[in-house]
Image (cartoon, rainbow, N blue to C red):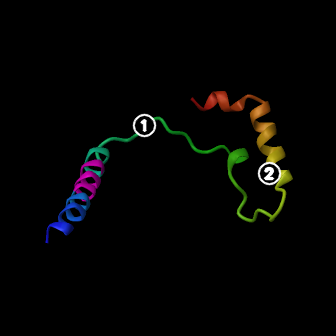
């Protein structure tokens, strides 16, 4: 019967750790001043397989314009 004790102890520790983590994060908003994602950064609903060159150009244009600095 002692061969199962370490496995049960480990499982109990994992469950308790998960409960404590969920309880601690529940009351606080981790990003209270969050803004919407700019349209330039949203992934298209239908991204073609292979090289997504158009999407990459859009991302590079956004980051090259330094607009991301205004996100906060």
**Mark-to-mark CA distance, 1 and 2:** 29 Å
Answer above or below: position of 53 versus 4. Answer: above
Mark linked to residue 55? 2
Identified at 85% across, 52% down, the residue is 54
Residue located farthest toward the bottom when viewing the structure as drawn: 1
Q: Which of marks 1 and 2 is nearer the N terminus?
A: 1
x, y percent for residue 40: 73, 45
- State left or right for residue 38 relative to residue 8: right
Crowd class of label 1 (few under 14; some 14 to 19; many from 20; radius 10 Å): few
**Per the image, is 49 magenta?**
no
**Quick one: 21 or 36, which is closer to the camera?**
21
Locate the N terminus by quadrant: bottom left
Q: Nearer the viewer, residue 33 or 8?
A: 8
Most common SS among magenta residues: helix
Q: Is residue 18 rendered magenta in the image?
A: yes
Tell me residue 12's x, y (percent): 21, 60
Q: Name the residue tied to disc 1.
A: 32
Query: What is the secondary structure assignment of the residue under circle 1?
Result: loop
Q: Mark 2 packing: few (<14 Cα in 10 Å), some, or many (20+)?
A: some
Q: Residue at x 29, y 54 (%)?
A: 18
User: Which region of the structure is painted magenta?
Assistant: 13-21
**Image quarter hosting the C terminus:** top right
Whole-percent x and y of residue 16?
A: 22, 55
Q: On screen, 36 above or below 51?
A: above
The residue nearer to you, when weighing 19 against 45, is: 19
What residue is shown at x 73% (from left), y 28% (from top)? 66
The residue drawn where x is 42% and y is 37% is 32
């Amino acid at each position: 019967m002692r061969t199962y004790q370490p496995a049960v102890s480990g499982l109990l520790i994992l469950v308790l750790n998960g409960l404590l983590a969920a309880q601690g994060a529940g009351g606080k908003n981790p990003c209270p001043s969050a803004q919407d994602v700019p349209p330039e950064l949203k992934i298209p609903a239908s991204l073609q397989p292979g090289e997504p060159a158009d999407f990459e150009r859009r991302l590079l244009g956004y980051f090259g314009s330094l607009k991301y600095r205004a996100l906060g």
